[in-house]
Amino acid sequence: MVSRDLPTYLEQESLWSALQTAAPAVPRGLLLDIGCGDKPYAALFPQVSRYIGIDLPPTTPVVRRPDVWASALSLPFADRCFETVFCAQVLEHVPRPEELLREAFRVLKVGGQIILTVPQTWGLHEEPHDYYRFTRYGLQYLLEDAGLQVRSIEPRGGAFRMMGQTFLSTYYLRKQIPRLTPGLRAFNRCWNSLFAYLDRHWPWNKDTLGYVACAVRPDDEAERGEE
């Protein structure tokens, strides 16, 4: 549960809600989390037999839970060894995202799936390694170009959620507020509740914070048959 007191509630809640919807479809077997950080989403996948996280060596002591330190552009795993690849809010930080997706395709078993989240609207972060934002059509192109079959691409909220989050993010960054006072918590709670309500009742998903996509590695024989 994401607290409505937080200035990032509208973003975080949309992300958790989207992943909670996608997670039950993940099968048993091996799951690879690309760019796992501290594995904040591992609890969403209790059904997998093993959850393997990979990330780059940390520049700060915060990131300490990966199982493997390596580049997502050259995964140190055999072909077709994972049932699921998971990648949350990472693709925008990869200078060559098409290579990451081709590597994901390579390590997926036939019929295996990738669950991917990306931003469409978000301020610069983790600079200077912040390269891209994605529309649903750009994301679809990248997935299909890597050989994957897209099952779904769903927006994470609409225009009101995006506007509400953008205001709070801008306000807190410009003011450089070090901590949340009781007054700020109350303001955030009211603001977040208002814009979440507006977003539910007047959806407009051409403006969105981002997307969650599900795609699968198709059967090679079926692909050749279609050709």
Image (cartoon, grey):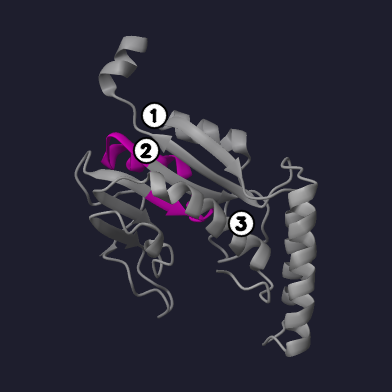
The answer to whether residue 43 is above or below residue 219 is: below
Viewer-side residue, 65 vs 22 = 22
For mark 3, what is the residue?
A: 14
Q: Is residue 187 left or right of residue 80?
A: right
Chain part drawn in magenta: 86-113
Crowd around label 1: few <14 · some 14–19 · many ≥20 (10 Å):
some
Element at label 2? helix
Q: Marks 3/2: CA distance?
A: 27 Å
Element at label 3? helix
* Residue 39 forms part of the magenta stretch: no
The residue under the point 57% across, 53% down is 131
Q: Marks 2/1: CA distance?
A: 8 Å
Look at discs 3 and 2 and give the one toward the viewer. Answer: 3
Where residue 110 appears, as percent x and y from the top left, is 27, 32
* Tags 2 and 1 touching, CB below 8 Å: yes
For mark 1, what is the residue?
A: 147
Which label belongs to residue 102?
Answer: 2
Task: Please state, as top left, top right, bottom left or bottom right, where the N terminus lies in the image.
Answer: bottom right
Viewer-side residue, 7 vs 127 = 7
Crowd around label 2: few <14 · some 14–19 · many ≥20 (10 Å):
many
Where residue 53 appears, as percent x and y from the top left, is 32, 61
Q: Is residue 8 left or right of residue 192?
A: left
Where residue 18 appears, as percent x and y from the top left, is 54, 51
Q: Is residue 206 left or right of residue 86?
A: right
Circle 1: residue type:
Gly
Task: Please state, as top left, top right, bottom left or bottom right, where the C terminus lies in the image.
Answer: top left
Can you tell which quarter of the image residue 57 is in?
bottom left
Circle 3: residue type:
Ser
